[in-house]
C-alpha cells in the first residue's frame, strides 16, 4: 500500500496531517498547484514499511518555490505585531 502524508502548518493554530490512501501523487501535486494545500511543512510518501520525505520533489513538480523555514510563521508574527501595537496604545 502506498499513500502520502501532507503536513500543513497553520502557525499558532497548529498543524494538520492530511492522510488519504486514495489520493495519488498526481492529485497531491494538483492540490498544491491549485492552492488547496498551502504552508506545507513536509510531504512523506509511505510505501509498505518505508517512509520517504519527498517535499522538495513534489513542490518542484508543482512549480512552487520552496519557502524557507523562517517564512512559515509570518501570520503569527503579524498577530504578535498587532498585539504589541495595541499594548503600546494603552500606555
Image (cartoon, rainbow, N blue to C red):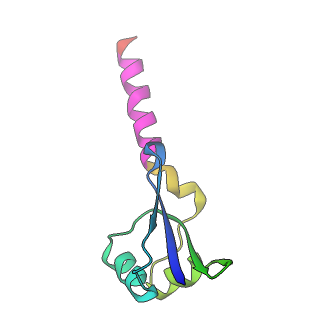
Residue 36, percent from left and from top: 32, 70
Residue in view at x 49 percent, y 69 percent: 6
Residue in view at x 40 percent, y 65 percent: 38
The reply, left or right, for residue 81 in relation to residue 31 is: right
Residue 70, percent from left and from top: 58, 55
Residue 24, percent from left and from top: 43, 85
Picture quarter containing residue 39? bottom left
Magenta span has 80?
yes
Q: Is residue 37 above or below residue 58?
A: above
Picture quarter containing residue 62? bottom left
Residue in view at x 40 percent, y 37 percent: 79
Residue in view at x 43 percent, y 52 percent: 10
Residue 86, percent from left and from top: 36, 23
In the depicted view, which residue is nearer to us: 3 or 80? 3
- Give the residue at the far top of this rendering: 91
Q: Quadrant of the C terminus?
A: top left
Q: Magenta segment, principal secondary structure?
A: helix
Q: Is residue 23 above or below residue 75?
A: below
Read off the magenta span: 75-89
Magenta span has 52?
no
Q: Is residue 21 above or below residue 11?
A: below
Amino acid at each position: 500500500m502506498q499513500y502520502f502524508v501532507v503536513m500543513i502548518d497553520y502557525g499558532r493554530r497548529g498543524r494538520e496531517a492530511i492522510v488519504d490512501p486514495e489520493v495519488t501523487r498526481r492529485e497531491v501535486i494538483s492540490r498544491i498547484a491549485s492552492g488547496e494545500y498551502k504552508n506545507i511543512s513536509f510531504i512523506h510518501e509511505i510505501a509498505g514499511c518505508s517512509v520517504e520525505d519527498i517535499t522538495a520533489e513534489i513542490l518542484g513538480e508543482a512549480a512552487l518555490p520552496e519557502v524557507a523555514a523562517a517564512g512559515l510563521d509570518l501570520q503569527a508574527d503579524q498577530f504578535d505585531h498587532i498585539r504589541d501595537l495595541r499594548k503600546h496604545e494603552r500606555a
